[in-house]
């Protein structure tokens, strides 16, 4: 490690998420510093590096990972570039925090799973940040306690103010509903075995060619049913909500129990406008937890198996959209390393 045990981190990808992680590691996180940034756009990499003391800009991830002052890697590049970066990190036996997706499809995620097993130990934490959100953590603790009995159903709502240009039906699943896929598996401790996708008449606010909103239903190997409303052009803000229905009660999160203002004959509050605002605390907690575990020589949090399982469920979800029928999820047997 670098000076006084500080973790030297190479951030790969300096787009919106990567730049935000550079800021987080530099200004919020303790025990780490950004020693390298990598981007195919050399000028952008240099610009980001210039704002960080003793940070080197690279265009080649392999060169950054070979540097003496790099102890760990945070991957925030586009999904198709993840496999090569992960395999390079494995070659150097470097710990990795990899933003979702682990890789864009189940076949490549399985290759990463197999490569990590050959190392004989975990190296990857996948960036499913909702697992670090205070409300989701409270719900997880409650469900694990058994106080409400067995979970029977999980209702989810996932809304964005507007979708970016070029957003597709498949991206509804791969970029958005993937989070509900992961929290379902995590909250319930069950694997998703089948996906059904349903479509109401599209909103008039949906761009041409995008069937928005949609309604997805998951079946799990524990007998639970899970639904997800995904509406990425709701127009008013960013909302993520969940309600667990159990044998002896229900629990709901995401109701914006924040400041309510009464003023001049009106009352109200504010609605987050994007995921970065809504989950800012979760991202901070996620990265700090990763840094702390890495400095202890441990790997915690969502694993390569979780990334692979999410990719497999996404593939079933996209097929369910395309074919208009229930699709089963195919998973390999879970390796001992991830049990």
Image (tube, rainbow, N blue to C red):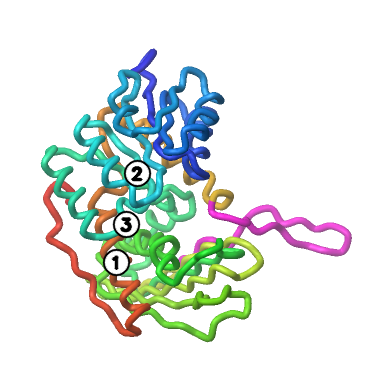
Q: Residue at x 58, y 69 (%)?
A: 233
Q: Is the magenta stretch mostly helix, strand or loop?
A: loop
Q: Does the magenta stretch include residue 292?
A: no
Q: Give the residue pinned by disc 3.
A: 104
Q: How far apart are marks 2 and 3 (CA)?
A: 12 Å
Q: Where is residue 322 in the image (x, y as percent from the top left)?
A: 35, 79
Label 1 packing within 10 angstroms: few (<14), some (14-19), many (20+): many
Which tag, 2 or 1, sits closer to the chain's start?
2
Tag 1 secondary structure: helix
Tag 2 secondary structure: strand
Q: In which quarter of the image is the N terminus?
A: top left
Q: Residue 275 carries which label?
A: none
Q: Is residue 253 magenta?
A: yes
Q: Position of residue 278 (x, y in %)?
A: 56, 52
Q: Where is residue 217 in the image (x, y as percent from the top left)?
A: 37, 77
Instruction: Work out which residue is located at the far right of the displayed protein and give it.
Output: 264
- Magenta span covers which residues? 251-275
Q: Residue at x 60, y 59 (%)?
A: 256
Which tag, 3 or 1, sits closer to the chain's start?
3
Nearest to the eye among marks 2 and 3: give it.
3
The relative height of residue 88 versus residue 55 in the rendered view (above or below) is below
Which tag, 2 or 3, sits closer to the chain's start?
2
User: Which quadrant of the structure image shows residue 32?
Assistant: top left
Note whether residue 248 is visible.
no
Q: Residue 98 carries which label?
A: 2
Q: Which mark is residue 313?
A: 1
Tag 3 secondary structure: loop
């Amino acid at each position: 490690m670098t000076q006084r045990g500080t973790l030297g981190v190479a951030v790969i990808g300096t787009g919106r998420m990567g730049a935000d992680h550079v800021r987080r590691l530099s200004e919020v996180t303790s025990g780490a510093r950004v020693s390298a940034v990598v981007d195919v756009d050399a000028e952008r990499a240099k610009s980001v590096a210039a704002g960080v003391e003793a940070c080197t800009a690279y265009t080649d991830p392999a060169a950054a990972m070979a540097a003496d002052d790099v102890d760990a890697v945070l991957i925030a590049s586009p999904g198709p570039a993840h496999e090569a970066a992960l395999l390079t990190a494995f070659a150097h036996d470097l710990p990795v925090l990899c933003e979702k997706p682990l890789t864009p499809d189940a076949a490549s995620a399985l290759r990463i799973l197999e490569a990590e097993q050959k190392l004989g130990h975990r190296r990857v934490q996948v960036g499913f940040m909702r697992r670090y959100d205070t409300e989701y953590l409270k719900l997880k603790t409650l469900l694990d306690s058994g106080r409400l009995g067995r979970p029977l159903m999980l209702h989810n709502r996932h809304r964005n103010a507007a979708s970016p240009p070029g957003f597709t039906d498949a991206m509804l699943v791969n970029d958005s509903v993937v989070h509900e896929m992961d929290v379902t598996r995590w909250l319930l401790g069950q694997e998703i075995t089948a996906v059904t996708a349903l479509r109401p008449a599209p909103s008039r606010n949906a761009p041409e060619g995008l069937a928005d909103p949609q309604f997805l239903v998951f079946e799990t190997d524990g007998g639970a049913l899970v639904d997800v409303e995904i509406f990425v052009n709701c127009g008013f803000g960013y909302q993520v909500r969940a309600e667990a229905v159990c044998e002896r009660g229900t629990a709901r999160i995401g109701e914006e129990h924040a400041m309510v203002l009464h003023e001049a004959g009106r009352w109200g509050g504010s609605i987050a406008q994007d995921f970065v605002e809504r989950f800012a605390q979760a991202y901070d907690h996620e990265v700090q937890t990763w840094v702390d575990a890495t400095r202890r020589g441990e790997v915690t949090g969502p694993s390569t198996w979780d990334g692979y399982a999410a990719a497999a469920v996404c593939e079933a979800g996209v097929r369910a959209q395309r074919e208009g029928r229930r699709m089963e999820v195919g998973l390999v047997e879970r390796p001992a390393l991830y049990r």
